[in-house]
Amino acid sequence: MVQFNQNIGNGSPVPEEENHDIDWIKLKLILKKSIPWFIAIFAVLILTAVLYLRYTKPMYQSHSEIKLDQENQSNMLGLPQYDQSSNMGLLSSEMEIIQSRLFFNKVVETVDLNPQYFTYGNILDDEKYLNPPFRVNYKVLNASVYNVPLDVIVVNQETFQLNYTVREKEYSKTGQFGDSIQTELIDLIIVLNKNWVIEDGARFYFRINSREVLINYIEKNLSVEPLNLQANTFKISFTDHNLNKAHALIEAIDTLYYNYSLQEKTKADRNKIEYLDKQLEKTEKKLDNFETYFEDFTIDNKTVDLNEDVRRTVDAINGLDSQRIKIENKLSKLELLQTKLLKTPYEYLTPKVNVYPAYLNRAFDEFNLLNNDLQKLGLSYKENTYTFKSRQKEVELMRADILAEVNSFKEDLQKQKNNLATTKQQLRRQLISLPSKNTEYNKSKRFYSVYEEMYLSLMQSKNGFEIAIAGSVTKIKILSPASLSTTPIYPVPLFAYATAVILSIVLSFLFAGVTYLAHNKIQSLHEIEFLTTATTLGAVPKHNLNGKVAKIIVDKHPKSAVSEALRSIRTNIEFMIPDKDSKVISVTSTIGSEGKTFISTNLGALLAMAGKKTVIVDLDLRKPKIHLAFEQEENSNGVSSILIGKGKIEDCVQKSSIQNLDFITAGAIPPNPSELILRKEFGEMIDALKSTYEVVILDTPPVGLVTDGLLAMQKADLPLYIIKADFSKRSFVQNVNRVLATGQFNNLSLILNGISSGSGYEYGKKNTYYES
């Protein structure tokens, strides 16, 4: 039986305060129905995790740990120590240096990051840093080729094809491995790696990055973070998809930072050495100048003895005069020779070894031979013959050559004569300047000694500072060198699967929560009790014993759960109206398809089977279905005929196959059903049926659509309101509350139809009860 609330004083229902607690039965049903969705969410997320692990490039990290040693000057001087907050400032300063773009630029210069070599994959490309399939030596001719992938297709072991696109223009070039190829934008040589076994047709690509791109790449992937402020330690990390590349960069950064720190520590000494080097260079130049002066002085004067220099200078002047006289004699003989050469017939030229150079003496001999031949030809040939003229031409050419050589030799002698005169003038001036040179020479010797002592002193100072630098130790210590871990920092399988599981749980809860909040359909008796104070007589479980239309099943399936539930409702009805010999029960709902006709017919069948003479009246004059429930096709004579006076009750009553159970169909569908219900004939019909039958069941139209149902309910001793689980909306219960609010239907009772197992109905365990 069902528990319901009742006002003891006037018998009218009192609305309960709305309960905002969680409807656990509804939640249980939603969770049960959502199990396939939960499984689907879990499967999708696990599959997503698998795909994520399969197609996400692993990211590796290499890191090192560095400690800064800070000198405490106060302790060295014996002063009291104070707790200063300088550690953070020191660490921040050093970390900013490592993260500066100037430092990144030095890293780019140190590490060989260009070009990058890649192998094509089905989805992911892989960079080959230490062991590329080939090596490229290149010269960029145009900056537009930077940061552009250049495809290399291996045609065979000797030939490749280079393809790339720059500014929507495609370039293609075929070349031989090891040979230089030239394009408009780049010159390069590609050499295969012998450690690779490359099939014909294999495709790779490489990329030459600009300096700005490389600096941005390092800036993006490098992180520097403090580890322990008290210990002055910090951590340098670099992440990359290539483990060896990340390791190489961390090693380079450690080395560069170590060298930088060492340079900073010895900066003062190096500045002093730099200054000393400049002073040494100046002093060395001055010493070189003095030494050059001494050498030149000795070379120019042949000795440093001035008296000897005077004697030698006089002898040199006399020697120059002798040379001048010889040259003048040669010039006079050359003039005589020129006169001979201009005379015809040509005279014999006498070679003179001491006067003329060897090439002139040879030319004289040749000329004399040609001239003798010419004279002999003159004895045998006439002067106008070709042979004579030819030989004469040779003699003239030879004479012209000799004249040219003589003139050249004469010019040389004249130059020598002029040089002798110049030299003589210089010697005369030197002879005059020798006393002043002696003074200058002695002064230079004194300065040379001073600069020599200064040079030695500077060298000693420089050696001292160099020894200090050699003994200097940097303030940094590399506690942990660059790591080389083969385990990627992501994706991490355990984390991916754990995330998938957690997300599946969270999404499942969200799905269940949204479904719970969005679900506006009645699920259970407990939910009805939340929404209304109307009496609930019971619940009818969901079944598949019906066909397309409602039918009587309690006689064919007496032991089914549906039959047992309807029997329980029948018992509750007996408690609701126990003192009447003839009972009128109306059955309605909010809309169609909620099971109103099914409940009416099967409940009537159970009452008849219990010995109650029962009649079921179809008052749904718009969409009659009672005749279909009793498997009757004929519906021409029924309630509408009685109400308009064209039929008698006894003529319209039809017998069913169940003993004590009769029914009256709706009859022909009238144009004005509501007006027919308002007629006095309707009341007379009810009274007549009550006099004949113990139970009169009125199958009324849905009250949410038309008013016929409310009119019929006024004649009922017990109005029943049908709500269908997982079909009727929660707002339908508000119709029940509105009906109760009229005060005309205080004993309005509810039946929940089509409830799922576990939704608040368990036969034998959750029977409803009635309070008397």
Image (cartoon, grey):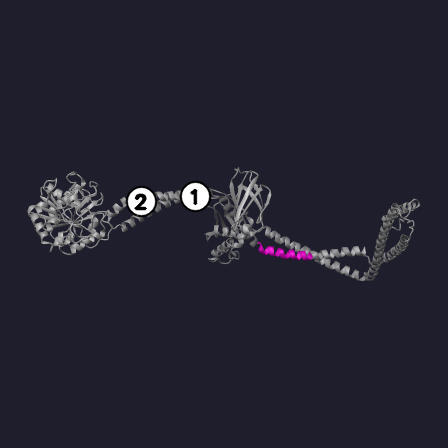
Q: Where is residue 592 in the image (x, y as percent from the top left)?
A: 20, 49
**Up/down of 657 relative to 721, above or below:** above
In the image: residue 580, left or right of residue 463: left
In the image: residue 467, left or right of residue 765: right
Quick one: SS at disc 2?
helix
Closest to the observer, 612 or 452 = 612
Closest to the observer, 475 or 644 = 644
Who comes first in sequence, dot 2 or dot 1? 2
Give, as a single range, the part of the protein colored magenta.
Answer: 266-283
Amino acid, disc 2:
Trp
Question: Which secondary structure class fits the magenta region best?
Answer: helix
Closest to the observer, 160 or 98 = 160
Marking on residue 589? none
Closest to the observer, 13 or 703 = 703
Q: Where is residue 375 in the image (x, y as percent from the top left)?
A: 92, 46
Residue at the outermost right position: 379
Is residue 396 on the magenta stretch? no
Q: Residues within 10 Å of mark 1 (few under 14, many from 20)?
A: few
Residue bearing mark 2: 37
The answer to which quarter of the image holds residue 632 is top left
Residue bearing mark 1: 55
Q: How far, Cα to Cα, is label 2 from label 1?
A: 26 Å
Q: Where is residue 287 in the image (x, y as percent from the top left)?
A: 71, 56
